[in-house]
Amino acid sequence: MAAPPDLLWVAHPRHLPAAPGGRVVVLDVAFAAGGQWKSKTKKVIDALGDRLAAWIDHHEHKEGWAAYREDPRFILVPNKIAHGSPEMVTPERVAAAGRVDVILAHADFDGMLASAKWLRGGVEPWPAADEDARAVDSPGRGHTLTERGARFANALDEASVAYKQQREHALLTRVTHAIAAGDSDPALDDELDGLAAAARIAEQRARAQARRDGELVSPGLFLVRVDARPDNRTRRNLLVFAEEQARIGGLLEPDPQGGHWLIAATFDERLDLADVEGFEGGRSDYRFARAHAGGQEQIAALARYAQRFA
């Protein structure tokens, strides 16, 4: 029996590893924002060449995706259609890819679950696993999250903050293999339960912070301003709260190198935040831009865009 593929994790699309050896499948990894995809993403694609078995993703990049539209190895479906990546990992696509030596995946719940599903030949590891991925990766779209899915998602969110990257990625690998095999590991279960409990507390704190530091700056835009750069888990929780208050939720946060970033997110599928000038990175429902002069120009642009859908 052939050994399962190695698992490599990607924390950010700008920080792709060098092209690994063997045949590679890429799951839930976005193209680098704006024109950076040419020096970051394309570099890896070119280095892999024919060794790239498949690239499956739902973080739309209009320019980058257009370059591979005719290549059947690229299964690129906008988030408006595919609310989670695992639903695109099907038995037919796994079979068509053939032998795979390495899975290169986004280091989050969506990427982990897509990887576990790939290891299972495209079969969900539990009933409604695809729905769990949609609920976590595309909140506010009417999807239902099971207790099992919430436990894994919360634990991995907490690990992304509490652990150094090497330890976090090791946990992702352990969880992926355990889920794919249907194994039970008491030590792993205890670790996940502790992480999930801490994540629930962190969510409550973030929502309280958003209530305190957020404001409805226009009828369609709720903006949270923070004085320190939040971790990824807190950022997500702040934005979810903001999205619950208005058509677009925004987060203005400082850049440690100077200046600010403005992140925008929406539950409303009529909106494509890529249509707001300057918001180059992300996908249709989640974009970011470097903010100038306190972000007033970008905030006003988001407010005007939200009003178009009032």
Image (spheres, rainbow, N blue to C red):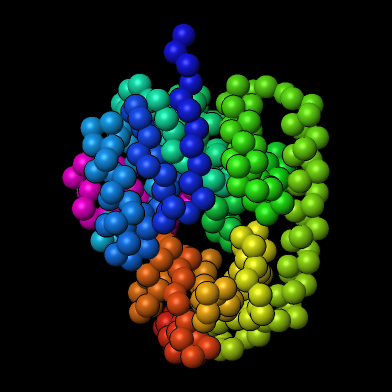
User: Which is more toward the observer, 247 or 208?
Assistant: 208
- Give residue 64's position: percent from left, percent from top: 27, 56
Residue furthest left as drawn: 70
> In the picture, residue 94 is in which quadrant?
top left
Q: Is residue 76 magenta?
A: yes
> Most prominent secondary structure in the magenta stretch?
loop
- Give residue 244's position: percent from left, percent from top: 63, 71
User: Which is more toward the observer, 192 or 70?
Assistant: 192
Above or below 64: residue 296: below
Picture residue at 77% right of the left edge, 55% below the top? 200
Q: Is residue 252 magenta?
A: no
Number of labels in the image equals 0
> In the picture, residue 246 is in which quadrant?
bottom right
| Residue 245 visible in the displayed image | no
Picture residue at 50% right of the left edge, 24% below the top? 120
Left or right: 69 in relation to 256: left
Above or below 91: residue 258: below
Left or right: 65 in relation to 115: left
Picture residue at 35% right of the left edge, 74% below the top? 275
**Chain part drawn in magenta:** 65-85
| Residue 139 visible in the displayed image | yes
Picture residue at 31% right of the left edge, 45% below the top? 44
> In the picture, residue 24 is in which quadrant?
top left
